[in-house]
Amino acid sequence: MIAFVTRRLAQALLIALGVVTLTFILLHAAPGDPFAAAAESPYLSPQAIEQARRNYGLDRPLWVQYLRYVGNLARGDMGVSFSLHRPVSEALLDALPNTLLLAAAALILDFGLGITVGTLQGMRAGTRLDRTLSIVTLALFSTPVFWLGLMLLLVFSQTLGLFPVGGVTDPVLYPSLSPLGKLLDRLWHLCLPAWTLGLVGAAGTARYQRAAILEVVRQDFIRAARARGLSERAVAMRHALRNALLPTITLFGLTFPVLLSGAVLVETVFSWPGMGKLTVDAVLRRDYPLVLGATVLAALMVVLGNLLADLAYRVADPRTREER
Amino acid sequence: MNRLRALLIAGSGALIWIRWQRIWDLLQAGDFSDRMAALAALAAPLVFALGRLPDRWKRARLDASAWVVLAILAAALLAPVLAPYDPTAQLDLANRRLLPPSPAHPLGTDLFSRDLLSRLLYGARLSLWIACFSVAIAVVVGTGVGLAAGYLGGTADALIMRLVDTALAIPRIFLLLVVLTLWEQGGIMTMVLVLGLTSWFGTSRLVRAEVLSLKQRDFVTAARALGIAPIAILLKHILPNALAPVIVTATLGVGQIVLTEAALSYLGVGVPPPHPSWGSMIADAQPFLPTHPWMAIVPGLALAGTVVAFSFFGESLQAKLDPRRR
């Protein structure tokens, strides 16, 4: 086990280093020179530009710049944002909790709904219910997440007036609410964005879970369980679902990047001040240190998510432990 | 089948009858794609009347999803003929802004008095054009890289696959946003290139896996024993057998790229204005959601419908191309 963990950890670190290298390459392959405009200015002598270049370390060979870039990132230094005039890492850390909250809520909905629907479908494969749900999940899976968000806004907040149109808390009432009221206000604001993100994810999870159940249901031990006269419910819950959940653990790792990408759009629709909205605003202002920082952070979260999923799979499935 | 054929002939004939003036204008003064659209509209009844489906297609029996995909492609191709107005023309900023649907404007007009039906149709053309070209790039690059990795094996394979792992670890939209921030957000060609060059990682993995498994098969061993050059084995024996899953992912990829392009356009970094795109149409409609909900609903339905059609089509293709999954 320890050998596996170390190996897997080394692999994750390598991919993380790869991501950082890739962003460095992208940054340097991009056209334009930071001092191109300065060179044309009549007010700056070539010596002053050379001095500035030296100050930023841009006169050093590329590999020195690369090592410095990696070193800075390892210490959490992602540079200073052009548009916010504050360190990128600070801005990201401020926005991260909101994104994590949204992603966690969406993840619960995603897996709760997806596994329930997928199991139901798999146990009753071929029935009309299964076919209807298959069409619904495929349609939902193909729905653009930002449009679904807008439609939920249209129905639940603008027509029915049940939920707020955006933001994390009520801008006026929040400071005067009791602690319990504050919590409820937050949850109330969380509902629509989380459902938007969760529904699209649940559609994918349900399709995956249905296939996993179908794989399991074919096997002999399910036939044996049925032959012993167990109720269909007991067969589903105790025998089929337990085994079909194994591949779903892998799906957990795969869901993470999808959730983060979706969060970028959902946060924009609901003006949710998270990492995604921060990134989109940064893109529109061409604030590349912030965009790069957010990308590196997102990729690291994905790598971490995959690592956790792999370890969980290892713990959950005894068969994988025996190989090496 | 005969009733359908009669219907298609009548429909395409009626289109020429109604829009002959427009077709004539397009033929005389349109750009290349406008002329192609006009010619396609003129040729359609003839093709339907005289054309005969190849036997292979008849046996494959096109299902509903294939017909929907064909209809969407036809609407996109014929956009210049079908659209009542120029999609970028601001018709009358004083009196015709934000009109509700009416006979003159079946889907109404937007804030700049542009006809929304025309924008929807031209949007389909642009979206699918971008998607098809990007997928073509992704398939060529992905297949090439996958073949190379699977064929070379060893260190080269390990290096290439680690690179692919790394690229896959970055959530797609972040990768796209980085590239679009660092490079000039130029025209539509940039979009095609960026989308294509960031979409091949999955394909390359798939092709590599196919190559590795096909390499072990007896017919490859036989070819090798016959002394056929490795590169010829790769291109003539392995590649054709690895193509089925590639075709399926390409079909699904068209839907995915339509979605991605719409998302980027919604965020304001995709197709530059005033070009019509479904994503930017939804973004433009957002402020008017309470009063003009159809402005956002219609392009979203078109978008979801297109992606669903390509997903169903991809799945049915998969079932047809892979007998093991039947």
Image: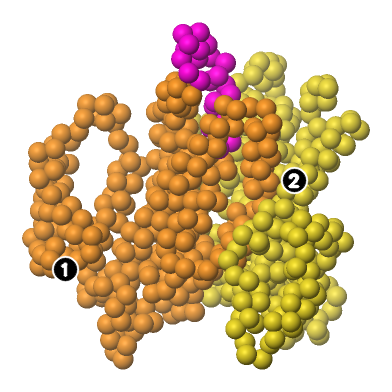
Chain colours: A yellow, B orange
Amino acid at dot 2: Ile
Residue B191 appears anywhere in the view: yes
Chain letter, disc 2 residue: A
The quadrant of the rendering that contains the C terminus of chain B is top left
The image position of residue B47, as x and y in percent, is 13, 43
Report if residue A195 lies within the magenta region.
no
Residue indicated by mark 1: B29
Task: Give the distance between the C-alpha atoms of the residues marked 2 and 1, in whole angstroms.
Answer: 54 Å
Relative depth, front residue between A309 and A55? A55
- The crowd level at tag 1 (other Cα within 10 Å; few <14, some 14-19, many 20+) is few
**Numbered marks: total:** 2
Say which residue appears at 52% left-offset and 62% top-offset. B263
Q: Name the quarter where the N terminus of chain B is drawn.
A: top left
Q: Which residues are magenta?
A: B204-230
In the visual, does A308 lie left or right of B221?
A: right
Q: Amino acid at mark 1?
A: Ala
Circle 2 residue: A15
Q: Is residue A214 left or right of residue A234?
A: left
Residue at 21%, 57% (x, y): give it. Answer: B37
Q: Main secondary structure of the magenta part?
A: helix
| Quarter residue A50 falls in | bottom right
Q: Is B227 included in the stretch rendered in magenta?
A: yes
Give the label on residue A63, or none.
none
Residue A207: image x %, image y %? Answer: 57, 40
Q: Is residue A185 above or below residue A261?
A: below
Residue A185: % across, % down = 74, 74
Q: Write down the quadrant of residue B98 in the picture.
A: bottom left
- Callout 1: helix, strand or loop? helix
Pick the front one: A265 or B1: A265
Mark 2 surroundings within 10 Å by alpha-carbon count, few (fewer than 14), some (14 through 19), many (20 or more): many
